[in-house]
Amino acid sequence: MRIGVVSVQGAFPEHISSSVQAMRRMGVEGEAVPVRRSKDLEGVDALIIPGGESTTIAKLLWRFHLSQRLLEMAEEGVPIMGTCAGLVLLAKEGDDQVQKTETRLLGLMDMAVDRNAFGRQRESFEAELEIDGLDKPFPAVFIRAPVITRVWGGCRILSRYQGSIVMARQENLLALSFHPELSHDTRIHEMLVSMARR
C-alpha cells in the first residue's frame, strides 16, 4: 500500500510517520510518501491533505498542478483525509475569511466551514473525543482549528466537540478539524488504511 501526504506546506512529516505506524500495527505492507508534484500521485492508494495555512496550500495545489488530479482521484474513490486546513479545502462552502482571501476550495464534501472557529495559535488545546467507529475516546489536538458549521447531502457527522462538528465522512472522504498526527494514537490513520483496503 502507498499513502501519499501532500507536502507543499504544513504538518506533513508527522502524517508520514503516523501512516507508516498505522500500516505496521495493522500488518499491512506499505510506505508513506511525500507528494509535491502530480507525478508523485501515481500508484497512491490513499491521500492526506495536512494542516497548515489553507490559503497557501490551496495556491500551491493549483500552482503545482495537483488539484486536478486530486479531484479525479476523489471521483475514482481513492480515500482522501483532510486535517485542519485540509478539512477547509475539502469543503464546498467557506466562511467570510475564505472568501476574503479568495481561497480556491476543492469543493468535494457537502459541508460548510468556519476557518478559525477556535481562535488563534495560543488557543490550541487537547480534548478526548468520542468518534463514530472508535471504541474509546481519541486524544485530539486542536491548533487554530476550523469547524464544520453544517453538513448536507451525503456528508455524515462522525464527531462533535461541545456541540461543534469536528469530524465528518462522505464516502471515500474524511475531514477532521484536529491533528491526529500529533497524538500517539494511530487509529484515525488506521481508519484511512482500512478505507484504502476495501
Image (cartoon, helix red, strand yellow):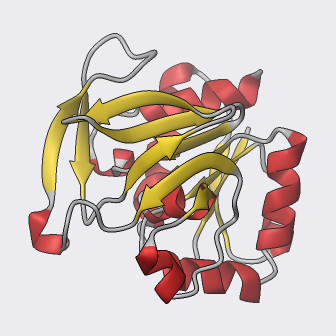
**Looking at the image, residue 189 lies above or below residue 38:** above
Q: Residue at x 36, y 42 (%)?
A: 166
Q: Residue at x 74, y 89 (%)?
A: 63
Q: Residue at x 40, y 57 (%)?
A: 14
Q: Report whether 115 appears left or right of 172.
A: left
Compare residues 102 and 143 and report the one nearer the observer.
Answer: 102
- Examine the rendering and report whether any part of residue 81 can be seen: no
Q: Report whether 41 appears left or right of 122.
A: right
Compare residues 23 and 186 and report the one nearer the observer.
Answer: 186
Q: Residue 151 in the image: x percent, y percent?
A: 54, 40
Give the quarter of the image for residue 139: top left
Compare residues 54 and 136 and report the one nearer the observer.
Answer: 54
Q: Residue furthest top?
A: 135
**Looking at the image, residue 58 lies above or below residue 93:** below
Q: Residue at x 31, y 33 (%)?
A: 160
Q: Quadrant of the C terminus?
A: top right
Q: Quadrant of the N terminus?
A: top right
Q: Residue 178 in the image: x percent, y percent?
A: 33, 50
**Looking at the image, residue 109 lies above or below residue 198:** below
Q: Report whether 7 appears left or right of 119.
A: right
Q: Residue 30 in the image: x percent, y percent?
A: 68, 39
**Looking at the image, residue 98 lies above or below residue 13:** below
- Examine the rendering and report whether any part of residue 152 can be seen: yes
